[in-house]
Image: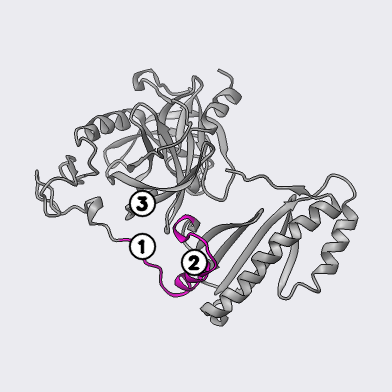
Amino acid sequence: MDSRDVISIYRTGVIQIATPFSTGTGFYLKEYDLIVTNEHVVRDNKEVVIDGDTFDKQIVEVCYVDPKYDLAFLKAPSDHAMPRLEMADFEEIKEGDQVIAIGHPFGFEYTATQGIISNMLHKQDQIEFIQHDAALNPGNSGGPLVDRNAKVIGVNTFIIRNGNNIGFSLPIKYLSVTLKEFLLGEGHAGVRCNSCLNLVFDNSESGGYCPKCGTRIKLISDLESYEPMGINKTIEDMLSELGFDISLSRRGPYNWQVTQGSAKINVSYHEKSGLIISDAYLCSLPKESIQPLYEYLLQRNYDLGGLTFSVKGNDIIISLLIYDQYLNLQTAKTLFEHMFQTADDYDNILVEKYGAIWKTNEK
């Protein structure tokens, strides 16, 4: 099968995942009606935010975590049109095979990179991994590693820093066995014991200990809900009072994304510098008659009241910068409400008067 066909098949079956602590990728298995990802992507969360091409952004429950194999399962959304993705036979996978690593983390476009398998027997902590040279980015964690027949052969798990595109994926054989074990829980959330490797389900009267070996475990039902602190709390309180759903706005540590009218707005807090940056992506540059638009942006920069126009690549952005020492709830509400409204107003002006191009809601 042509690699473009493979990539097209997975575009609607690969999912964005976000928590207050991280972002990552997942993929849907129709046979089990589950979303598969890495445990480290959803760690310490009962619920996560997911988004995909065939359903709206929403919150779903984490129903399985496996620190041993770095696997996690999420409940699938009730209303979607994700395709059936097939799992390969592990015995047919061999070194030299061509593979495609697919990822779709929040804030980035759908990505697919090609490579070959260089080692089928790389071991770490007594677990075999598929070593390959298809480039992986940190946000791709939990995405599928796919063969040229469009079958899943592994779960992208980690990379070696400065390792010249050396990536590692958990082979499909571990996922297949884990799925069968999980089904024995008859729909109850579960976790794998790190010591004896047995699965423990939330309906067991374990008291927080593995009933097989007595090791302390943390069941999903025992996890506490996330509570923001400091500047994060101020930002979230501000967004909430301005009418945004905080749980759906979070996209990793110190990052939020909201939509005001047709403008997509990112808010990020850089703790080391104390700088809070908000960028509203308004529209794209036109192909012709760009100079009048540039002149307009430069002129308006003098009158925006603390906001700034800029161009990044093909995107026209309006930005707000403020240091955390000057931020309280009332100041935040005043500044961000002004920015959100300005962003929603100016994209219309840039499109209707200067020929800029509307941005579509990319998933």
Q: Is residue 183 left or right of residue 283?
A: left
Assign the C terminus to one quadrant of the image: top right
Q: Is residue 356 above or below residue 73?
A: below
Q: Is residue 252 left or right of residue 362?
A: left
**Residue highlighted by disc 2:** 240
Query: Could you say which is closer to the camera, residue 156 or residue 121?
Result: 156
Label whose residue precedes the other's in the sequence (2 or 3): 3
Assign the N terminus to one quadrant of the image: top right
**What residue is drawn where x is 88% and y is 62%?**
295
**Residue highlighted by disc 1:** 226
Q: Is residue 271 above or below residue 191?
A: below
What is the three-letter code of the residue carrying label 1? Tyr
Residue 125's quadrant in the figure?
A: top left
Q: Residues within 10 Å of mark 2 (few under 14, many from 20)?
A: some
Q: Is residue 168 visible?
A: yes
Q: Position of residue 133 (x, y in %)?
A: 51, 34
Q: CA distance from mark 3 to mark 1?
A: 10 Å
Disc ID at residue 47? 3
What colour-coding does the image apply? one colour
**Range of residues picked out in magenta:** 225-248
Q: Residues within 10 Å of mark 3 (few under 14, many from 20)?
A: many
Q: CA distance from mark 2 to mark 1?
A: 15 Å
Label whose residue precedes the other's in the sequence (3 or 1): 3
